[in-house]
Amino acid sequence: MKIVDVETIFADRFLFVRIHTDSGITGLGECGTGGYLEAAEKVVEKKYRKYLMGQDPLRIEHHWQYMYRWSHFRGAAIMGAISAIDIALWDIAGKHFDIPVYQL
């Protein structure tokens, strides 16, 4: 299974990240940055999307570490973007293994 698309979705005052896989499974995660949603969206679109394309979505901890450590700056927009991606990847894992995320 590989990641084929990463999209951002604005809904009112919320930012969501949806990750699509080549097997048809999608994961949805929410960005919790409050007033920095536009900045978090750009981080997802301009930096993390390039990295995630073609990657195995089940290597969640590896992806989290890579995204967290790629830069010395770790402000609210960066952490919000990572958070949304992380949640979406766990959502994919839960659907892939057919168990609730809390049991992972």
Image: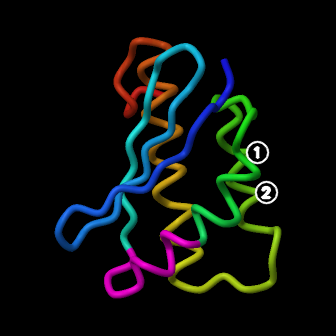
Q: Circle 1: is it few (<14), some (14-19), or many (20+) Cα within 10 Å?
A: few
Q: Where 12 sits versus 83, above or below? A: below
Locate residue 87 relative to residue 67 in the image: left or right: left
**Which residue is found at the position 65% from the left and 53% from the top?**
49
- Amino acid type, label 1: His
Disc 2 marks which amino acid? Tyr
- Image quadrant assignment for residue 54: top right
Residue at 21% over, 73% down: 13
In magenta segment, residue 38: yes
Q: Are marks 1 and 2 in contact (CB under 8 Å)?
A: yes
- Which residue is denoted by mark 2 in the rendering? 66
Up/down of 50 relative to 76, above or below: above
Residue 10 location (% of width, % of height): 30, 63
* Residue 62 tag number: 1
For the stretch drawn in magenta, the main secondary structure is: helix
How far apart are the alpha carbons under marks 1 and 2?
6 Å
Q: Is residue 52 covered in magenta?
A: no
Q: Is residue 78 left or right of residue 9?
A: right
Residue 22 at x, y = what percent? 60, 19
Magenta part of the protein: which range? 33-42
Provide residue 72's location: percent of width, then percent of height: 80, 84
Q: Circle 2 sits in a helix, a strand or a loop, which is it? A: helix
Which quadrant of the rendered structure holds the N terminus? top right
